[in-house]
Amino acid sequence: MIAQTVGMARRRSFAATTAIVCFAYFALALLLMHPLRPERELATTWISGYAVGRHGWVMTTAWLALSSGCLMLVLGLARGGPRSRAALLGTLLLGILSAGTLITAIFPPGPSRSGEIHSISFLVNAGSILLASVLLSVGFGSDPRWRSFQRTAAALASLLVLAFVLQFFTAYFELLYGLANRLFATMLVAWLLAISIRLRALARA
């Protein structure tokens, strides 16, 4: 019984650590795209645009890393996360995000069928992560192991939602939408990393 418990904890720790590495790679690759593609204006360039053209493979691998990280986080939460309905539904939405970002990586943006699929996947991804952040923040309060983390998760989820609203309005008015897009990506990575770090800490404890 003890060996089985230790084995499960190790698997949760491995899943969380792998997720952290994947999310860190996504952030690093996105930062790297700026010096690699200096001709693209930050204020008017969506991060997905880096997947097209020179060094596009860097952005593609970043999306693959984000997809893999979300999948590992889902596996970790399935074993060591809260069991409330809100938390389970939030975990399921993270799984949809994992599949959605995989599609984002496979189908780059542009004036083609691939671009249409990419745009649809973006909408699905955004909806999934926003709902997942809210549901998981609520669900963390139902589990004593996660309850102390609920306030942090809720604060990051609120910032993530605000960043998306800002991105929506800047895109609508075509004003600094590139910067807003990067802010949304930053809050997304911060939220995912925070949960992954908490999951690893609980597994090691």
Image (cartoon, helix red, strand yellow):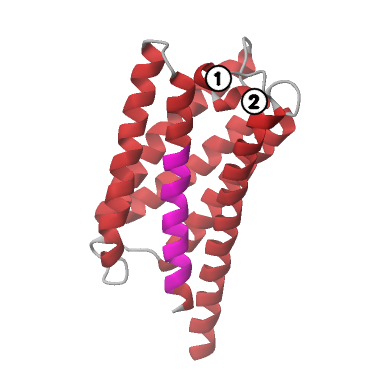
> Label 1 sits on what residue type?
Thr
Side of 185 where 151 appears, left or right? left
Q: Earlier in the sequence, mark 1 or mark 2?
A: 1
Q: Which residue is mark 2?
A: 50
Q: Main secondary structure of the magenta part?
A: helix
- In the picture of the structure, the residue carrying the numbered disc 1 is 45
- What's the magenta region? 186-202
User: Residue 152 appears at what percent x and percent y?
Assistant: 30, 56
Indicate the secondary structure of the residue bearing disc 2: helix
In depth, the one of 6 and 171 nearer the eye is 171
Taking 112 as reference, is 168 above or below it? Answer: below
Residue 51: in sight, yes or no? yes
Q: Position of residue 21 (x, y in %)?
A: 60, 56
Instruction: Indicate whether 3 appears above or below 95.
Output: below
Determine which quarter of the picture holds residue 158: top left
In this view of the protein, which residue sits in the foreground, 78 or 68? 68
Badge 2: how crowded within 10 Å, few (<14), some, or many (20+)?
many
Q: Amino acid at mark 2?
A: Tyr
Q: Is residue 15 magenta?
A: no
Tell me the quarter of the picture where residue 79 sits.
bottom left
- Residue at horizontal 46 percent and vertical 73 percent from the top: 203
Residues at discs 1 and 2 in contact (Cβ within 8 Å):
yes
Q: Quadrant of residue 112?
A: top right
